[in-house]
Amino acid sequence: MKAIFPVAGFGTRFLPTTKSTPKEMLPIVDKPLIQYAVEEAAVAGITDMIFITGRNKRAIEDYFDRAYELEAELSQKAETTQLEQLRAVIPDGVNFIFVRQGDAMGLGHAVLCGRPAVGDSPFAVILADELLYTVPGTPNASQQLIAAYQHTGQAVVGVGHVLGKAIERYGCVDVLETDAQGIMSLHGIVEKPTHVDAPSQYAAFGRYVFPSVMFDYLAGVKPGRGGEIQLTDAIAALIADHGAVAVNMDALRYDCGTKMGYLEANLDFALRHPELGAGFKAIVEARIAA
Ligand code: G1P
């Protein structure tokens, strides 16, 4: 399977940092956000990572390229740990493909830009600013979606439960019955409804798996909310003809597109970190006690 990572967004919520640094390169403790997304995909067996990029995003291409000078320097100094860390950025057997989205016409348009690179196979879409943590040794979010796709043969939307008005910030799914595998059949999906109009409290959390026919729906959909080509509208059209399912992902989710979610992710990932966790916990506890 291939995966599309739409990374062309401006990251306006993180200005001024994102004036020249892609938001996907912001670190969560010691790795940029995009690396968490790529590692999740690689563990799920995805071999082709397709980035839909834009202006100011060249740092992502450089990050996933070899750094010969740096590697030569580190190996000369026998800095093996750092060398391994550097090489681990690029998982084995993985290809990186970069496509420029010339016009910023929305998430649906970004995904459509990946069509020539995906071709005729099913594909995942991963939004890197939604960081999904799963306990090591359990299936990660992309694995959970791919399993549901293999089980049903239908498009899969990864969702999570949100409280109250929070639903107004997301694509919201209208779900029907849940089967024995915990897969919900999808009746509809709507982009950022008002709280009162929301068909459920289940929000799309940036993970999807689609059959390749999805590209026809993306190509056919009219500009929607905010005048943009919405991924959600194309899913709604796809559901009508082909059906789709939703998976309530078993994962802890951090909305790293917001400052608060980003801080929360850094706090939790630091506390869980094998080398930094204990020392960091002591600092946090001392601060709270003060
Ligand atoms: C996008 C999607 C939305 C989804 C959200 C997840 O919205 O359009 O359906 O729920 O990502 O983060 P955005 O956050 O780009 O406004």
Image (cartoon, rainbow, N blue to C red):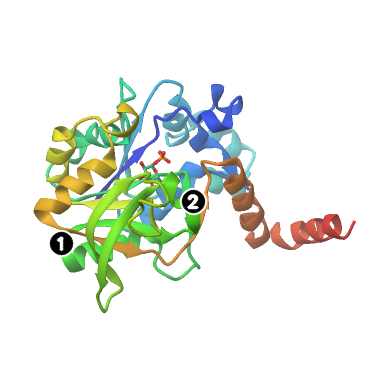
* 208 to the left or right of 66: left
Q: Quadrant of residue 234?
A: top left
Report whether the residue tagged 1 is closer than 8 Å to ligand 1: no
Say which residue appears at 23% left-offset and 54% top-offset: 188
The three-letter amino acid code for the residue at tag 1 is Gly
| Quadrant the C terminus occupies | bottom right
Mark 2 lies on residue:
166
Q: Quadrant of residue 283?
A: bottom right
Residue lying farthest to the left in this orientation? 241
- Residue 64: where, in percent of width, then height? 43, 37
- Residue 105: where, in percent of width, then height? 30, 26
Mark 1 lies on residue:
153
* 184 to the left or right of 274: left
Q: Is residue 174 above or below residue 190?
A: below
Tell me the element at label 2: helix
Give the camera-side residue of 67 and 137: 137
- Residue 162: where, in percent of width, then height? 47, 58
The three-letter amino acid code for the residue at tag 2 is Ala
